[in-house]
Amino acid sequence: MSTPKIVLFYVFTPLPDPEAVRLWQHTLASAHGLTGRIIVSPHGINATVGGDVRAVKKYVRGTREYAPFAAADVKWSDGRGDDFPKLSVRVRPEIVTFGVPDELHVTADGVVGGGRRLAPEEVHDLVAERGDDVVFLDGRNAFEAAIGRFDGAVAPDVENTREFVAQLDSGVFDHLKSKPVVTYCTGGVRCEVLSALMRSRGFEEVYQLDGGIVRYGERYGDDGLWSGSLYVFDQRGAVAFSDHPAVIGTCSRCRVPTSRYLDTDDGHGRGLALVCTECVPA
């Protein structure tokens, strides 16, 4: 019996021929029967794919045979087997669409000028040392933060990643420029860029949660600084890190607690509504 698994990874590294990488990745993933989304750009690769665990392992081994991707930090999670409708491999100007590709500078060592990476344990050390001065900044869309976020986090009211730059430039977060700010997102890729954009705009002490919420959840589950469920962009909708996650979302119809999104649109976060099973049965 097959065991479905999903892997999530990204690598920031200059790719002189993104189209060649796209073709190779499509061939590699499709040869193993995998589905999911892979984005390639001149800045690197961002991938979430799933399938039978043996096939996924072969894909990961094949991807790491390409020297620039050899050290990719691959995050594993359980799948259902029908998590993605198809395989999509595309070339885009950015692997995370902030809308400012010319602002991002990437070398073989990764993003230039990003925030200092903190492992989950180091985040706890920082909070223990600096207390309430530490600000958690959610690097995801507002609907993602609605069902899960770090305690006391600032969750910008954005519908997509492009809106972050306008928010930063508006000055709405200028009061945080002298504070220790820990940025976080699902797997870490958005914060690689966000933290660099913040530092270039005068934020003095910026960190990024290394490995994102996924890595933090693996370490602390629901017994640390995280509350709620993690929204994921596949058929699972959301995942929890334990058998006792907090439920911080509320049904848009009856206002009871729920972490269940009903997708009324295209699967990319637009048209999502929090709806409990009493209002709309599963």
Image (cartoon, rainbow, N blue to C red):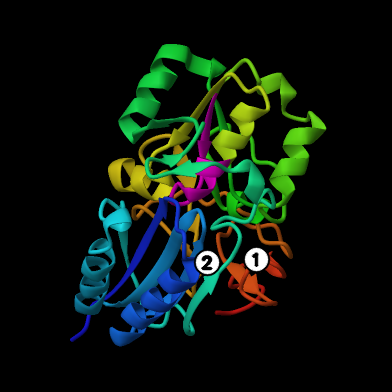
Visible residue check, residue 68 = yes
State whether residue 73 is above or below residue 122: below
Residue 182 magenta: yes
State whether residue 63 is above or below residue 175: below
Q: Residue at x 53, y 48 (%)?
A: 190
User: Upstream in the sequence, badge 1 or badge 2?
Assistant: 2
Q: CA distance from mark 1 to mark 2?
A: 8 Å
In depth, the one of 87 and 15 nearer the eye is: 15
**Image position, residue 206 (x, y; %):** 53, 26
> In the drawing, what numbered circle is on residue 233?
2
> In the drawing, what numbered circle is on residue 27?
none
Q: Residue at x 72, y 62 (%)?
A: 252
Q: Are marks 1 and 2 in contact (CB under 8 Å)?
A: yes
**Image position, residue 210 (x, y; %):** 39, 39
Residues drawn in magenta: 181-193
According to the picture, the residue beneath numbered tag 1 turns out to be 269
Q: Residue at x 46, y 59 (%)?
A: 16
User: In the picture, residue 282 is in which quadrant?
Assistant: bottom right
Q: Secondary structure at mark 2?
A: loop
**Image position, residue 213 (x, y; %):** 43, 46
In depth, the one of 86 and 22 nearer the eye is: 22
**Kind of residue indicated by mark 2:** Phe
Q: Residues within 10 Å of mark 2 (few under 14, many from 20)?
A: some
